Structures are given as C-alpha cells and as structure tokens.
Image: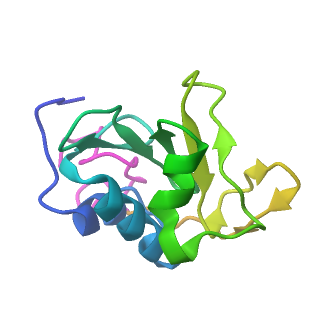
C-alpha cells in the first residue's frame, strides 16, 4: 500500500472504501470536531490524521475508533450521540475508544445491533474483476 497517498477529501475516501452514505453525517461530525489534516488509505479502513495532538482516527465501514476516552467520543458525536449506540473501548487499540456508525456490517456494540447493508464493490473496467477497497485493481493496476 502506498502510504504517501492522500485522499483529496473525506468524501473521496468514504466513496473509495464503499462506506454507506447513511454514515456520512456521523463521520463528518466526528472528523470536524477532532480536526483532521489528512485522509490516507489503510488495508481495511481510512486513517484520518489529526491536525493536532492525539491518535489517528481509523474510519471503517461501520465504525470509527481512535478517541482518547469515552468523553471525547461522546463529545465528537455532538447532537448525533445516541444512548442506543454508546461509545465502546477498542479491543485492537488498547486505551482508545470507538463509535458504531448507523449502518455497519453487523458489528454489535454492547447490546446495540446496527442495520446491515450489502456492500457493492466496483468492477474493474479492464479485467472485469471485483476491485478491492483500495485505490485500484490489484490484477491490472488500473
């Protein structure tokens, strides 16, 4: 993966990773609150580099994590915070917190279940194979 590559915008990043539009408002709210300097692709999520101090946010199909504590996660959600989907402690990033997006791929946060949708992946115009959730076709580099 080209770690130097940077998306031109959050919208470009979420489109490339096939994140449902129903999650846009939550993702915009938290990234605006935290302040993001750059969006970069990782294997299965978008790395949102903070403009200030603090850990990067990892934005995936159904969740975002990288908040320093539960209060930061709740604060970042602003008016979109819901008691039905409380922030949770990250199991993969010890000491950090995450939130579940309105539409996820079946992730369960505590007792909260979110709605799932079928992901539609792009098809390469050259070799007609499914394009992974990265920047290009791994078969023909298109």
Quadrant for the N terminus in the image:
top left
**Which quadrant would residue 82 be assigned to in this image?**
bottom right
Q: Residue furthest right?
A: 111
Magenta residues span 123-142
Comparing 75 with 108, the one in front is 75
How far across and down, in percent of the image, does residue 119 sit?
A: 56, 64
Horizontal and vertical percent position of residue 129 = 40, 53
Compared across the picture, whether 50 is left or right of 62 comes to left
Residue at image coords 38%, 63%: 122
In the rendered view, tell whether residue 75 sits above or below residue 140: below
Q: Main secondary structure of the magenta part?
A: loop
Who's the residue at 24% across and 54% down the image?
35
Number of marks in the rendered image = 0
Between residue 23 and residue 74, name the one nearer to us.
Answer: 74
Indicate whether residue 137 is drawn in magenta.
yes
Q: Is residue 59 depicted above or below 25 in this figure?
A: above
As drawn, is 58 to the left or to the right of 89? left
Residue with the most extreme top position = 94
Is residue 28 among what the camera can see?
Answer: yes
Q: Is residue 96 left or right of residue 90?
A: left
Residue at the image point whose x is 75% and y is 65% from the top: 114
Residue 8 lies, in percent from the top left, at 11, 59
Residue at x 88%, y 54% (from the top left corner): 111
Who is closer to the viewer here, 122 or 89? 89
Queried whether the magenta region covers residue 1, the answer comes back as: no
Q: Position of residue 67 (x, y in %)?
A: 47, 41
Visible residue check, residue 64? no
């Amino acid at each position: 993966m080209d770690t130097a590559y940077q998306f031109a915008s959050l919208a470009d990043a979420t489109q490339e990773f096939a994140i449902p539009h129903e999650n846009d408002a939550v993702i915009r709210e938290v990234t605006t609150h935290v302040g993001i300097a750059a969006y970069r692709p990782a294997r299965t999520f978008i790395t949102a580099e903070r403009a200030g101090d603090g850990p990067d946010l990892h934005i995936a199909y159904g969740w975002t994590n990288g908040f320093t504590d539960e209060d930061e996660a709740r604060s970042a959600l602003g008016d979109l915070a819901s008691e039905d989907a409380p922030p949770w402690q990250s199991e993969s990033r010890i000491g950090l917190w995450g939130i579940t997006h309105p539409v996820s791929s079946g992730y369960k946060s505590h007792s909260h279940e979110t709605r799932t949708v079928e992901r539609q992946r792009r098809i390469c115009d050259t070799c007609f194979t499914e394009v992974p959730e990265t920047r290009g076709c791994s078969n023909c580099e298109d």
